Image (spheres, rainbow, N blue to C red):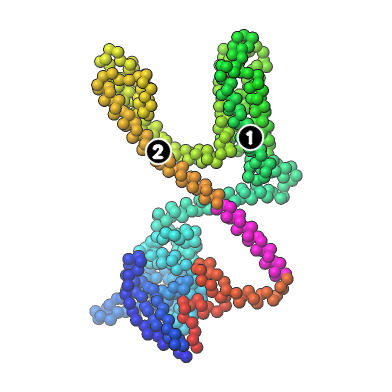
Amino acid sequence: MRNTQTPSLEHGETTDGAMACYNTFLLKTDNVEKKIIMWGFPRTRYTNCNGSSGASEQTEVVVNIGGVKQVLYGDVLTRFPETRLAGIVESSSAGSEDLSSLCDDYDPDSRELYFDRDPDAFKCIMELYYYGEIHMKRGICPICFMKEMEFWKIDPDYLDECCKSNLSDVENELAEIAEKVKTILVDRDGDPSGTGWQRLQTILWRLMEKPESSLPARTIAIASFFFILVSSVVMCVGTLPDVQIENAEGNLTEHPTLELIETLCIGWFTVEYVLRLISSPNKVKFVLSFMNIIDFMAIMPFFVVWTLTSLGTAMMELANVQQAVQALRIMRIARIFKLARHSSGLQTLTSALKSSFKELGLLLMYMGVGVFLFSALGYTMEQSHPDTLFTSIPQSFWWAVITMTTVGYGDVYPKTTLGRCNAAVSFLCGVIAIALPIHPIINNFVIFYNKQQVLETAAKHELELMALRTSDDHLMAGSRCSQGSAAGSEIWDRPLTSAHSEAHAPLGKTACAKGGMESAE
């Protein structure tokens, strides 16, 4: 039975607002009517050179992109001759063999070319031929879209600048995910080609640095967290006069019990630091790391004070040595930063502050200008009062700082009317100066925190996919060994899911891929 087609042309408006032509065909096959809509851009018609109203013929190219038919015209496609579509126009006058090499399949009867590509991405691709640049629609994966551009032989320079920045962000995220997955795999599997000492070093490194790798590693991380808290509490309690005792010279010193607890904590920190240094794969990077510098500063004062004490009382009686010992004892507060090693929230806050250096610099600049301006004005306006508290401009800096930050201790305050007006303006300007950079800093923290969550989720998902692929490969290998050559004939009978669409298309004949126009012969 032959197909009967009744074509009709309708004009409509696309979702993008551009006028388009809809060619509607009524296909009757075995008393079943099917309506096929062919979407295409407006066709440009040119008058002949002699001024007649007849239009010159153009080369029409019918393409089927993932099941969506589109009619394109040669004068539009040849605007960029290096692209695949322009090559199709040039090869349209040649045989079907040349056209078949440029598409996934070709129907010589209807002269229709089939492409197993994303139709939504192809609409963006067509913007190049009409507008000279490509804008990637929202919801399309940038990496997949770049593969589409590569397939259609379009240079990435034609991509809009905003889309290029989006693509760069996605590429950076993928690189970070790949690096995170690589780190997880190395931590989990290690290097199987390493020597015995290298494998032992890897096990020790995972034990000290990766709490999520095993139960013993998690136990060590909890113990380290406990020692940090105990050491910080002991350092604070040791300064209470009721807890301190007098030595032979009548000076207050720390209680011996607190000193013993402090020694135990320092011993734990020292063993932990040495083990991490020994097992580190990169010793130089380990030593220069910020968190490891904090760890070293937390244990170094104890050994320096112990060394100076061991040299005898004559050395400790020196004033400079005593001041150095007090300074080293104050450096013990650095151990509180060790909590950041075991807290992802503190790590996120540190990274957010790093990325907000520009905003923090603006805040300091605003405050610096305001402090200098209002302290100078306050000093000048308060000179007429006999009991003025503003003795100099540098001394007024303190008043300006506590006023602009709305702290207001009350130790320095203006007494004249002009001075009070200056104080009111100063704290209003201080509130504005502090509030302006705060929102970008908070926004950077939220962005970085969400990014960390996405990276961790994506890395776990990638590991699950890798494990699934590995299990599928083992199953397929076992199936091939058991079924032999008989399995090969069944593979081609199963439907294949397209990589660029959700439709199922059988390998072999392309009857289903032709947009619903089945053969009724």
Q: Nearer the viewer, residue 266 or 163?
A: 266
| Residue for point 32% across, 17% down | 390
- Magenta residues (range): 458-481
* Residue that appears at 28% across and 23% down: 420
Image position, residue 251 (x, y; %): 59, 11
Would you call the spot at circle 1 few (<14 residues within 10 Å), some (14-19), or many (20 or more)?
A: many
| Gap between marks 2 and 1 measured at Cα | 34 Å
Q: Which residue is mark 1?
A: 224
Q: Quick check: is 461 in the magenta stretch?
A: yes
Q: Is residue 25 visible?
A: yes
Give residue 405's quadrant in the image: top left
User: Amino acid under label 1?
Assistant: Ser
Circle number at residue 44: none
Is residue 102 visible to the viewer in this orientation of the structure? no
Identify the disc placed on residue 438.
Answer: 2
* Place of residue 93 in the rendered image (x, y in percent of width and height, measured from the top left): 44, 79
- The verdict on residue 35 being magenta is no
Kindly state the secondary structure of the residue where label 1 is placed.
Answer: helix
Give how far across and how far down residue 427 sits, in percent: 32, 29
For this orientation, the residue located farthest to the bottom is 1
In the image, residue 513 lies at what x, y percent? 50, 76
The quadrant in which residue 77 appears is: bottom left
Q: Earlier in the sequence, mark 2 or mark 1?
A: 1
Task: Report how many numbered discs are placed on residues in the image.
Answer: 2
Identify which amino acid the numbered label 2 is placed on.
Answer: Ile
Q: Residue at x 49, y 53 (%)?
A: 170
Residue at 34% x, 81% y: name it.
Answer: 8
